[in-house]
Image (tube, coloured by chain):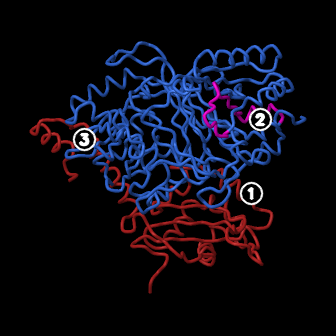
Chain colours: A red, B blue
């Protein structure tokens, strides 16, 4: 059966978790204070391509006038991730590598069992998982590690090409063999 | 009036745009948002508000002289005056806290605190800026445009003496700008060709000015991308501060950019010797146009004076047939700052919300032709632009398209002409067989100072001048 959450070897995980009444500001502050880039706790997940934590306060409607406006019963913390392989090892990795941080943001949500209780933690996230209507992955067949090493290779080749510009053929060949040996 | 028209110095290659019925309240907006003045002389005068009540009296006195967007119909005034305020300026003038809080964060923070994402590092860092800029002292910017320096001197003297005598304001920074006779910038390139065509303004856009419609034609960019209170490209009203600042006003970017002409010329001369196309083509590849304005996208091998002189053609081009940049490099300056319908931008769907109206002007005397030794004189461009959203428009262009290359598929390369050099690295790839790598990147442009401003409607100016504290 077609899996809407999968594109190639990449998997997309989305969970909507209801925020406890009165905890909206606390979870917002928690998310905003997270370090970005390599310092982000999410950077400890080596199968994670891309992730986003955001808060849905209300439904925004931009169409023609409606008789009845849909409203959320509470604010939601929305976690999305695009990852390599399967969901289970990914959720295990969250519990292993960033339990305190995960408790920090999901702890403000309804019925959160805590990362220490691993099976309950995974069950809770899967219970709140929603299927993705449309998932496309920039790297649907390449792992995070493969993308990283391809980028590093690109840098080396570019550096070589820039430095070797204008060399005589013999010298160019010599430097190619010494500097890029084993790469190509 | 004929004599005056001549002195306005409109370049022959850029005749006036045609008029059409307008949907914008031209009498309530300040004139330079939708109209590019061709006055040769301009002064950018930053004022500090010393005494609020007196400053408001000065503002009330200036009000009738602020140039609006109404058509001149042949009666061009000898000078034009525009007025804009920094966040600190609005606060000093007594705008209530609850109104101030409705202004966007980047405006409240100011340009200096955005230095990191704007690439204002090293010699461009705010610590090295000119006195009075980026320090919270600049409260209002009076821009005066005139047919000659005498007219400028007059109004400037008035501002200084009246402002100071009444203890109302003090001039904290000032730059005199003057269009170069050639119509070019200091690097020698014809400037100001491309501007977004704005819907509803009563001015017909030239081909290439609007946004690509995906079918090979152009359509006007929605009014709300540049003026608050009008529908934008997202078909809603742009986010705007509270009344009276919610309509007919716009956000203004002021950046004084020093240009190292000697460094640019020497670099082009030196690297041009190693480049098979020679120095002229090399410089054109960095910019994306030949010095006369001919776009590389239309004429990649040589400038085409006939094309450059035809306003119907000189901006009418696309990057769709040149995905890897064989004609115009992906990293060329004009392709970066307005990628049009380039690969990855979905027929312009992803560029249409990142356009700006540019109103820059050169300052300083030109370095004589052929000279490659620095004469130690200060010269450059007063970069001014208008947009409805500083972050989505100006800052996105500057931080993602100029100071980074990832969105364009060229890694961490920065704009080779105006970008901030990246340590010892940085390069421009000129695609070809073989490609040519320009490296390392040098600094040709240094930020001397800047401010984010809000240019209110005439209505809002009146409220500012009269409101009780």
How much space separates mark 1 and mark 3, taking CA atoms?
A: 60 Å
What whole-number distance in Å separates the C-alpha atoms at marks 3 and 2? 51 Å
Report the residue marked by disc 3.
B301
How many residues crowd around disc 2 within 10 Å: few (fewer than 14), some, or many (20 or more)? many
Horizontal arrangement in the rendering, residue A108 relative to residue B222 (left or right): right
What residue is disc 2 on?
B90
Residue segment shown in magenta: B69-94
Query: From the viewer's perspective, is residue A17 above or below residue A154?
Result: below
Q: Quadrant of residue B117?
A: top right
Disc 1 target residue: A26
Disc 3 crowd, CA 10 A, few/some/many (<14, 14-19, 20+): few
Q: Is B75 in front, or is A153?
A: B75
Q: Nearer the viewer, residue A105 or B27?
A: B27
Secondary structure type for disc 2: helix
Labelled disc at residue B150: none
The answer to whether one can see residue A39 in this image is: no
Mark 3 or mark 2, earlier in chain: 2
Q: Residue at x 57, y 46 (%)?
A: B19
């Amino acid at each position: 059966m077609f899996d809407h959450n999968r594109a190639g070897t990449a998997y997309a995980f989305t969970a909507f978790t209801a925020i406890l009444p009165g905890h909206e500001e606390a979870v917002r502050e928690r998310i905003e204070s997270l370090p970005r880039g390599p310092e982000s706790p999410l950077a400890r997940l080596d199968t994670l391509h891309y992730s986003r934590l955001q808060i849905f306060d209300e439904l925004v409607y931009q169409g023609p006038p409606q008789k009845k406006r849909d409203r959320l019963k509470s604010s939601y913390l929305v976690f999305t991730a695009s990852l390599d392989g399967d969901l289970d090892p990914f959720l295990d990795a969250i519990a292993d590598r960033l339990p305190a941080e995960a408790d920090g943001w999901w702890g403000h949500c309804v019925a959160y069992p805590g990362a220490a209780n691993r099976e309950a933690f995974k069950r809770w996230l899967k219970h709140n998982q929603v299927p993705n209507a449309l998932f496309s992955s920039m790297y649907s067949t390449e792992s995070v590690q493969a993308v990283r090493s391809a980028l590093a290779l690109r840098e080396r080749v570019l550096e070589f090409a820039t430095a070797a510009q204008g060399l005589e053929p013999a010298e160019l060949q010599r430097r190619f063999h010494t500097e890029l040996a084993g790469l190509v | 009036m004929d004599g005056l028209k001549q002195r306005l110095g409109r370049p022959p290659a850029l005749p006036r745009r045609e008029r059409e019925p307008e949907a914008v309240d031209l009498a309530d907006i300040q004139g330079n948002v939708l109209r590019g003045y061709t006055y040769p002389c301009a002064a950018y005068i930053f004022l500090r508000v010393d005494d609020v009540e007196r400053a408001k009296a000065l503002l009330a006195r200036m009000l009738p002289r602020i140039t609006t967007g109404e058509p001149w119909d042949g009666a061009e005034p000898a000078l034009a005056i525009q007025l804009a305020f920094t966040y600190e300026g609005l606060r000093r003038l007594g705008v209530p806290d609850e109104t101030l809080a409705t202004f966007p964060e980047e405006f409240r923070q100011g340009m200096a605190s955005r230095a990191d994402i704007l690439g204002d590092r090293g010699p461009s860092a705010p610590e090295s800026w000119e006195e009075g800029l980026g320090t919270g002292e600049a409260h209002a910017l009076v821009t005066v445009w005139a047919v000659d320096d005498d007219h400028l001197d007059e109004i400037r003297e008035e501002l200084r003496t009246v402002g100071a005598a009444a203890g109302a304001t003090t001039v904290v920074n000032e730059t005199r700008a003057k269009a170069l006779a050639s119509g070019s910038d200091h690097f020698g390139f014809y400037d100001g060709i491309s501007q977004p065509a704005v819907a509803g303004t009563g001015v017909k856009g030239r081909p290439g000015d609007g946004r690509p419609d995906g079918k090979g034609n152009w359509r006007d960019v929605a009014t709300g991308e540049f003026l608050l209170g009008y529908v934008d490209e997202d078909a809603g009203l742009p986010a705007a501060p509270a009344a009276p600042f919610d309509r007919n006003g716009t956000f203004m970017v002021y950046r004084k950019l020093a240009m190292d002409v000697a460094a640019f010329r020497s670099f082009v001369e030196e690297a041009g010797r190693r480049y098979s196309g020679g120095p002229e083509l090399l410089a054109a590849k960095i910019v994306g146009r030949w010095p006369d304005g001919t776009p590389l996208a239309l004429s990649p091998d040589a400038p085409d004076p006939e094309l450059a002189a035809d306003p119907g053609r000189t901006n009418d081009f696309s990057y769709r047939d040149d995905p890897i940049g064989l004609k115009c490099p992906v990293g060329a300056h004009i392709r970066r700052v307005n990628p049009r319908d380039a690969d990855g931008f979905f027929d312009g769907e992803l560029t249409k919300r990142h356009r700006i109206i540019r109103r820059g002007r050169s300052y300083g005397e030109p370095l004589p032709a052929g000279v490659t030794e620095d004469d130690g004189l200060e010269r450059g461009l007063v970069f001014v632009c208008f947009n409805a959203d500083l972050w989505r428009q100006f800052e996105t262009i500057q931080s993602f398209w100029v100071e980074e290359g990832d969105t364009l598929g060229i890694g961490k390369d920065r704009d080779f002409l105006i970008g901030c050099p990246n340590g010892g690295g940085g390069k421009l790839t000129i695609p070809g067989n073989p490609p040519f790598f320009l490296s390392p990147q040098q600094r040709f442009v240094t930020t001397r100072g800047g401010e984010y401003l809000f240019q209110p409607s005439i209505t809002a100016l009146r409220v500012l001048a009269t409101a009780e504290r």
